[in-house]
Image (cartoon, rainbow, N blue to C red):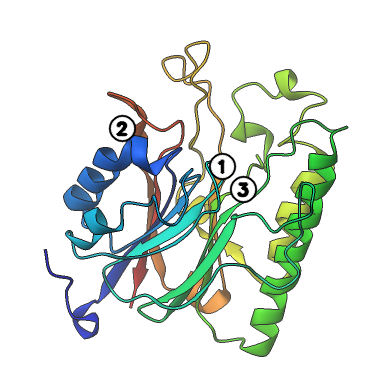
Amino acid sequence: MRAPPSDTVTTMRIATWNVNSIRARLDRVLTWLTETGTEVLAMQETKCTDEQFPHLAFEELGYEVAHHGLSQWNGVAIASRVGLDDVETTFPGQPTWAEPPAVEARAIGATCHGVRLWSVYVPNGRTLADPHYAYKLDWLAALRGAAAAWLQAEPEAPIALAGDWNVAPLDSDVWDIDLFEGATHVSVPERAAFSAFADAGYREVSREHLPQAYTYWDYQRLRFPRNEGMRIDFMWASPVLADRVTGAAIDRNQRKGKRPSDHVPVVVQVQQ
């Protein structure tokens, strides 16, 4: 499949999907791209090194891929059939984790048909008392600082921050808020760190066009059949880009069938 010339693209679909291991989910991802024709896909939790990533399979469909993976954990990627330029694998001030301290493979940025897209996999946090929780808050604050600086430097830049944020900003973003009392994802500091992107000038465009829907269902306890889900996958857009978004969708069907990811694709449609 050949990619269409970039100057003929009038509407671009940008999706984000935590694939929970690209090697385990490759056939599903490729089939979904083929069936939907999505131009750009930000992926998280690829769980492989750069050498292990199946570049050729994407290239055969007409997609260029930039991947950042250091081990069997984390890993982020961007696949695009409308151009892929100026790849970066960290953002300014990105915090470190572990011993010895290292920057994890949790962010990758690239320019796709004029849109500066970041695929982000925000740390989970684990528990409110775990050092990983402080790391999560530091990580979000650093990304917010970098994102604000990008807008200050170029207010008209079309920027998207897409991925698995591991934050449920509203009580309605979890199936039973009472069950989350004292847990991560819904704590006041996490929600404040998430909403700080609005203070930096960004708009969360998936909720603007689709107010209520889940994006994640745990594999355990029949969470999906019972629709006991969470909304933790989002896309923040700069003002110029947000004004060009004409719609959004969450592909719930991708949680069905054989060996699905526990997340589903979130797609926004951008007018060029």
Q: Choose top left, top right, bottom left or bottom right for residue 139.
A: bottom right
Element carrying mark 1? loop
Residue bearing mark 2:
253
Q: Could you tell me the amino acid type at mark 3?
A: Trp
Badge 1 crowding class, 10 Å Cα cut-off, few under 14, some 14 to 19, many 20 or more, is: some
Q: Which mark is residue 245?
A: none
Q: Which mark is residue 165?
A: 3
Q: Could you tell me the amino acid type at mark 1?
A: Trp
Q: Is residue 123 above or below residue 148?
A: above
List x then y, in percent, for residue 9. 23, 77
Q: Could you tell me the amino acid type at mark 2?
A: Asn
N-terminal of the pair, mark 1 or mark 3, is 1
Residue 139 seen in the current view: yes
Question: In 3D space, how far apart are the residues under numbered discs 1 and 3 (Cα atoms)?
Answer: 16 Å
Q: Residue at x 79, y 47 (%)?
A: 99
Element carrying mark 2? helix
Question: In 3D space, how far apart are the residues under numbered discs 2 and 1 (Cα atoms)?
Answer: 26 Å
Q: Nearer the viewer, residue 199 or 190?
A: 190
**Relative to 17, is 228 on the left or the right?**
right
Of the two numbered discs 1 and 3 in the rendering, the one whose residue sits closer to the viewer: 1
Q: Choose top left, top right, bottom left or bottom right for residue 173.
A: top right
